[in-house]
Image: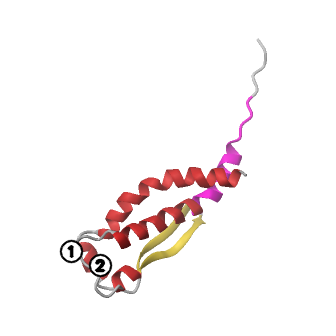
């Protein structure tokens, strides 16, 4: 029986994933922001302050063994009341768009391979 060779590329795949993860997370958060701004049935936009306060507040970056980013409302205190008492629009946007993270990770890994 002949020898079997294995060409393990795990380290290369891991490097590509670490480079792609922040871009994939940023893409996912951007879609969640848009989803929020276009779908908040529990309240009506009157002044654009609440809608305008929701952005990516911290682009994704690697921190130790994790890659993290933040999005949400900044500077509009009553956004908490809208979220808790008027339909959870931020959480609903996350529920809808976070499912796309694996697709974005795969897409950005392919783009990084070129």
Q: Nearer the viewer, residue 92 or 38?
A: 38
Mark 1 neighbour density, 10 Å: few (under 14) some (14–19) many (20 or more): few
Label 2 with label 1: CB-CB less than 8 Å: no
Is 11 placed left or right of 78 in the picture? right
Percent across and percent down for residue 29 are 47, 66
Mark 2 neighbour density, 10 Å: few (under 14) some (14–19) many (20 or more): some
Is 41 placed left or right of 61 in the picture? left
What residue sits right under mark 1 in the picture? 85
Label whose residue precedes the other's in the sequence (2 or 1)? 2
Percent across and percent down for residue 24 are 55, 59
Is 34 placed left or right of 110 in the picture? left
The residue located at (32%, 85%) in the rendering is: 77
Q: Which residues are magenta?
A: 6-22
> Residue 96 occupies which quadrant of the picture?
bottom left
Percent across and percent down for residue 61 are 59, 67
Magenta stretch prevailing secondary structure: helix
Is 17 placed left or right of 53 in the picture? right
What residue sits right under mark 2 in the picture? 80
Percent across and percent down for residue 36 are 36, 70
Q: Helix, strand, or loop for circle 1? A: helix
The residue located at (46%, 54%) in the rendering is: 100
Query: Which quadrant is the N terminus positioned in?
Result: top right
Q: CA distance from mark 2 to mark 1?
A: 8 Å
- Above or below — where is 52 with respect to 6? below
């Amino acid at each position: 029986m002949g020898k079997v060779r294995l060409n393990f590329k795990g380290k290369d795949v891991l490097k590509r994933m670490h480079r792609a993860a922040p871009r994939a997370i940023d893409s996912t958060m951007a879609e969640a922001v848009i989803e929020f701004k276009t779908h908040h049935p529990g309240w009506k936009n009157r002044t654009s302050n609440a809608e305008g306060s929701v952005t990516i507040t911290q682009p994704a970056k690697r921190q130790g063994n994790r890659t993290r980013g933040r999005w949400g409302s900044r500077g509009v205190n009553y956004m908490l009341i809208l979220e808790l008492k008027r339909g959870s629009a931020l959480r609903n946007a996350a529920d809808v768009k976070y499912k796309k993270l694996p697709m974005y990770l795969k897409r950005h890994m392919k783009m990084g391979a070129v």
